[in-house]
Structure formats: structure tokens, C-alpha cells
Image: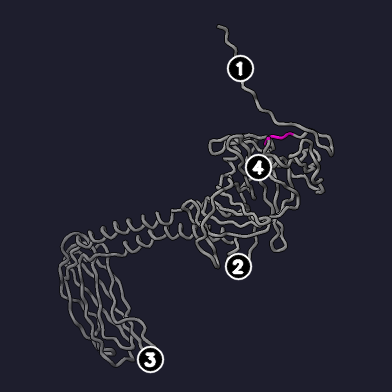
Amino acid sequence: MATTSVNPQVVKPKSLNCPSCGAPVNIRGFAHTLNVVCPNCLTVLDASTPEFTILQKFQGKIRIQPKIPLGSRGKLSGTEYEVIGFQTRVIESDAETFSWDEYLLFNPYKGFRYLTEYQGHWNFVRVQTALPVTMGVGIRPSVTFQGRRYRHFDRMTAQTAFVLGEFPWQIRVGDSVEDSDFISPPYMLSSESTDGEVTWSLGEYVPGKQIWQAFSLPDSPPRPVGIFANQPSPYAGKPASAWRLWLWLNVALFALALFFMMRSSNRQVFENDYVFVPGGHADPAFVTPSFDLTGRESNVKLSVRTDLDNNWAYFSFALINEDNGQTFDFGREVSYYHDSDGSEGGRNDSVVIPHVPSGKYYLRVEPEMDSKNLRDMRYSIAIHRDVPNFGFFWIAALLLVIPPIFTSVRAASFESARWRESDYAPAASSGGGDD
């Protein structure tokens, strides 16, 4: 039996001529297209009639070239779309004009989608049939949609300034809509109101590089300028992770400090009480009885406690090894003053001498006070061997807190820059929006 091969019919765009300039005009959206713009003279035509009817002639002075040419095809979210329409919208804010571009995408089976671009920031947009639920009103309204909460970002009046291609709705240069944007990065939920009709759409932020790859565009996409309303923060979730890591590192640091504290003997090897008489004729310097510093080479802590009152004292110390004469010289000043406004300084002080070898030692002490002072000073000296020193751990704890603070500040700065472009900026600032 003979077989006959059947080639599937390829649906081609309908082509008619522009009644204004005679140039050919293609219709890619088939029966969906209501308006089409002549690519030659930019006249807006009515495509709902068998013959094109002129709706609006181009009066502008600047012809805008889309970054993605009409007729380009690209795959987004697993579906191939063709760019069939383009418009530029503008808003005025604080005597400044801001504009963004919108591309109409079409797939015969999936319908229409949109790409919006503002200063290198792109969104892939789909019109929604379900309505969001209002959650909060007042200073900053919010809505929920598909289980996600969106905060109000801005409200504006947008006007169409340039059109090209075809559209499934009646479009004219000069058309205006009331636009309101709610954000939950990387998503933006927007409403457009015109003549009592409200249309909701959901946009998702897409990097320009991904758009260029999808449509196989030459060169590189324009670099994003500033921070866009629903641009994902590069620090999203990082502050919480940084603080969790900080917490666990501090737990480990605390365990390490506890280990060193338990390992340190912290034993007292000497203590005695003394009296210093200012202006006395005897040499104030003296040496203490010998004491043993045993065990491994470790630190020695010397503590001085006095009964100073509105006075100061200086102690010159020398820890001397009785066997080999090795000497550790150091001094401490103690001062304590007070009046009706409060107190200053303290009566007590201490010092830690690191890495003192074991052996038999004695301490040479030379106290000094203001010679005009007539009051005796009573003081005590105590020496401890192998005391736990937490200075290193405090330094480590301080260093550990820097990364999470830095990350939190960067994240907060990013969000602050985002909201400076909104209707809720802490100070007066202007910025464009995108629906």
C-alpha cells in the first residue's frame, strides 16, 4: 500500500499594508491582536477590522530602538516566546521624568507574557486572574498572594510614551494608568487601574544575562543601575546564618576558656599586709620572704589592695629568682579620689607576668606616695601562680562578632537603598518604578 506523507501546516503571520505609508505590517498574535503599530511610520492601526484603520499617527520626535528586537524568540520558564510588542512608559516625580520599557511576549499555547526593563533591571511578568488579599492598611499597606506577603512599595501614574508592534488591547501614545506596586523580592505584585478596571500582574526579577542568553542577543546586557524594588538581596539569609555561626563559635570559645580555667591551678603562693608611712626617714624599699613557684612555666599574678582615700601611690616591684638572679621589673600606680560628684580611680590593682619559670623567688617592693600626705597607707600584696587569663578569649570574642555585624550592616544598607526609592523613603528621594 502506498503511503502519503503529510506535512503539518505552518501558521504564518498575517501581513497587510499600512494605509498611511504603504509599508507591510505583520500580525503575529493572530486573532488576539487588536492594535498594531506600523514599523515604518509608527502609525497606530486598528487590527480588529479586515482592513487596517488609522487610530493615531506618530507625533514624537524620538524613535526608540528596543533592546530586544521585535520578532525575537527566546525560551523563558521552559516556554518559547516571541516578542511582538514594545512600549515605553514614563512617570514624572519631583520635576524629573523616569521611563522604563515593556516587551509583549506571545506563545500560541501559553498566551501573553511581559518583560519589563528599568535601568538594566528585568522582570518576567504574567497577568493574574486571582486577586490578592489585603492584610494591612494605613501607613504601609500589605497584601498576601499565593501564600506570600507583599509590602506596598510605590504608587504612580504611568503614561505610554512610545509604542511599537502589536497588542491585544487598544493602545495609544498618551494612555495613562494608575500603578501600585507591592514587593516580596524577587517578586513584585502590581495593579494597573484604568477606567474602573483593575488588572493584577506578578513579576519575577530576572538577571539581564539570563534574558540575553534566552534570546541569543549579541554583546552584553546593560549593567544594572542602583537597586531595584524587587531585586533579590545578595545578603538574604546571610545575617541570620552569620549570627548562628557566631553563636556556635562562642560556645566553642567558652568551652575552650573553661578548659584552660580548669587546667590552671590558680594557687596562692604569697600574701602579706603592710603599712606605708609617708615622709618617714626609713628606706621604704624592702624584700619579702622567699616563696616557691612550682610546676610548669606559667604566669604569675600580683594583686595590690590599699585603703587609699583621695590620694595616689606608686609601687615599684621586682620579682627576683633567688637561684639565678633572673628579674622581672614592673610598676603599678593606684589612685582613688572622690567628692560629691562621684569617684575616680580605684584602691586596688593587679598585674600578670607571663611565662615565669619555676623556682624560688622573692619580691622587692618600693612604695611611694605624695610627701604632703600625712595619712598612713595600709595595703596587702598577694601572689598567685598559674592563673587563668581570659584576655585572649575576650579578644577572640570581639573579633568573632565583627563578621555578623558587618554582614548585618551590609544587608541593612541594601534594604535601606531599596526603600529610599519607594514612597516610604526616610528622607525625600526620587526614583522610577516598574510594573
Instruction: Give the residue at x 38% y 58%.
Output: 243
Q: Nearer the viewer, residue 12 or 434?
A: 12
Nearest to N terminus: mark 3 or mark 2: 3
What residue is pinned by disc 1?
A: 6
What are the residue bounds of the magenta stretch? 26-30
Question: In this view of the protein, which residue sits in the foreground, 262 or 59?
Answer: 59
Residue, disc 4: 104
* Residue at the limit of the structure toward the bottom, as seen here: 374
Residue marked by disc 2? 427
Q: Is residue 246 left or right of residue 23?
A: left
Name the residue type under label 4: Leu
- Amino acid type at circle 2 is Ala
CA gap between label 3 and label 2 equals 45 Å
Residue contact between numbered discs 3 and 4, judged by CB atoms under 8 Å: no
Specify the amino acid type for callout 1.
Answer: Val
Q: Secondary structure at mark 4?
A: strand
Q: Residues within 10 Å of mark 2 (few under 14, many from 20)?
A: few
Res 181 label? none
User: What percent of the width, then of the height, locates residue 396?
Assistant: 35, 60
Q: Are marks 1 and 4 in contact (CB under 8 Å)?
A: no
Q: Say which of 365 and 179 sits in front.
A: 179
Question: Mark 1 and mark 3: span between their CA atoms?
Answer: 108 Å
Residue 340, numbered label:
3
User: Reading the chain from its start, which is encountered first: label 3 or label 4?
Assistant: 4
In the picture, measured across the screen, residue 91 lies left or right of residue 313, that is: right
Of callouts 2 and 4, the N-terminal one: 4
